[in-house]
Image (cartoon, grey):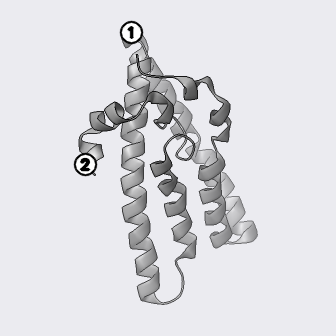
Amino acid sequence: MFLAVRPHCLAIWMPYSTLPTSSPWVFDPNENLIPAALALIPLAHGSVLLVITFLVAQQLLGDTAYTVFIVTELSLRQSLAPDQVLGRVNAAMQLLTRGMWPLGALAGGWLASSFGERYALFAAAAGVAFSSLWLIFSPLRRTSFF
């Protein structure tokens, strides 16, 4: 949580090519915790103690990794976009990401009703893990500090 409070420390320690952009998987090895944490949810079954352990671990790992991911992703976006279009860039990203939520809800509902809730949750974790693999070949990986 230190890096969530002091995100500039992360930006100083890591070049742009290792900062996350829109993938919780590709750029930062620490961000691999997001898909791994999401995979803990469908694994939570059995005794009450085991379920609580899996869900608490998911919450701690997932929230910590997601907080660092969001702070570094927004910092990178703000440092690359010109000041005069920064509001439009942030609005476009919000529209793109939040605009996908209803489609994801429909797909998740269909998967859950067709194959079961546990499989739908595994599919969601896999979707997060593999959603941005195309960024591996993106020119953004070769971006460096000024």
As drawn, is 88 to the left or to the right of 11? Answer: right
Dot 2 lies on which element? helix
Reading the chain from its start, which is encountered first: label 2 or label 1? 2
Q: Quick check: 116 left or right of 29?
A: right
Label 2, residues with CA under 10 Å away: few <14, some 14-19, many ≥20: few
- Give residue 119's position: percent from left, percent from top: 68, 68
Q: Residue at (28%, 52%) from the top-left corner?
A: 1
Does 126 sit left or right of 86 as displayed?
A: right
The residue type indicated by label 2 comes to: Phe
- Mark nearer the viewer, 2 or 1: 2
Q: Residue at x 55, y 41 (%)?
A: 23
Inter-mark Cα distance, 2 to 1: 31 Å
- Give the x, y percent position of residue 34: 49, 55
Question: How many other residues sit within 10 Å of disc 1, few (<14), some (14-19) or many (≥20)?
Answer: few
Q: Which residue is mark 1?
A: 84
Residue 52 quadrant: bottom left
Quadrant position of residue 45: bottom right
Q: Does 52 appear above or below 26?
A: below
Check disc 2 and report the residue beneath it: 2
Three-letter code, disc 1? Gln
Q: Secondary structure at mark 1?
A: helix
Q: Quadrant of the C terminus?
A: top left
Q: Residue at x 36, y 47 (%)?
A: 67
Nearer the observer, 117 or 1: 1
Q: Please give the name of the residue rendered at 36% of the width and 12% of the height, measured from the top-left corner.
A: 83
Residue 87 shows up from this direction: no
Q: Nearer the viewer, residue 69 or 55?
A: 69
Judged from this view, the residue extending furthest toward the bottom is 47
Q: Position of residue 71 (x, y in %)?
A: 36, 38
Disc sitting over residue 36 in the figure: none
- Whether tag 2 and tag 1 are in contact, CB under 8 A, the answer is no
Relative side of 75 to 44, left or right: left
